Image (cartoon, rainbow, N blue to C red):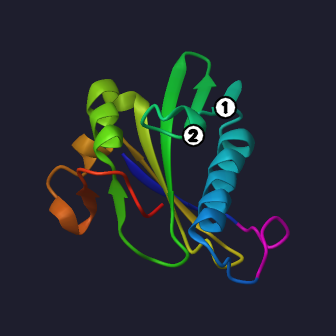
Amino acid sequence: MVSAVSIDSSEAYPVAAPASDNEIEMIAVRVAERYEREERHVDYLRSVEAENVGFDLLSLKDLERRCIEVKGRSGVASVWLSWSEYAKAVEIGDDYWLYVVLDCATPSPRLYRIQNPVRALAGFGSQILMFVSGPSQQR
């Protein structure tokens, strides 16, 4: 399942282009968190970024678990999963979600949500999703 949401963030995010990858990542995570809280009305949401478990956010709503990997880009660009992210996606299947936030350097970032990206994007090859063997340098 692949779906997209446009988030009006003019009051929540700076209009000036963020200068660093860390700022882009922070905006992307905030967009994902906002979606989970305001659109999905989740019961539980926690950042697990510092724990290096293969995804960034753990979201629970009723009996549904989402292990969400968030990728942010300042404009429109490719995203990559690290080997550990890919392995976790394979391990947990439909509970693994990839949230790609494009246009993070604009007032209106766009959120794309992909459930089980390994299965959903299997036929698209490296043009859509690239898997790398080392640590991800881009977020």
Return the residue at label 1: 46
The residue shown at (55%, 31%) is 51
Percent across and percent down for residue 74 are 55, 75
The residue shown at (45%, 54%) is 3
Kind of residue sitting beneath label 1: Arg
Extreme residue in the top direction: 63
Q: Counting other residues with Cα less than 10 Å from the Cα at mark 2, is it few (<14), some (14-19), or many (20 or more)? A: some
Give the extent of the magenta segment: 8-15
Percent across and percent down for residue 85 are 36, 41
Percent across and percent down for residue 59 are 60, 30
The one nearer the camera, 63 or 67, is 67
Q: CA distance from mark 1 to mark 2?
A: 9 Å
Percent across and percent down for residue 110 are 57, 67
Q: Quadrant of residue 78?
A: bottom left
Name the element at disc 2: helix
Return the residue at label 2: 49
Q: Quadrant of residue 14?
A: bottom right
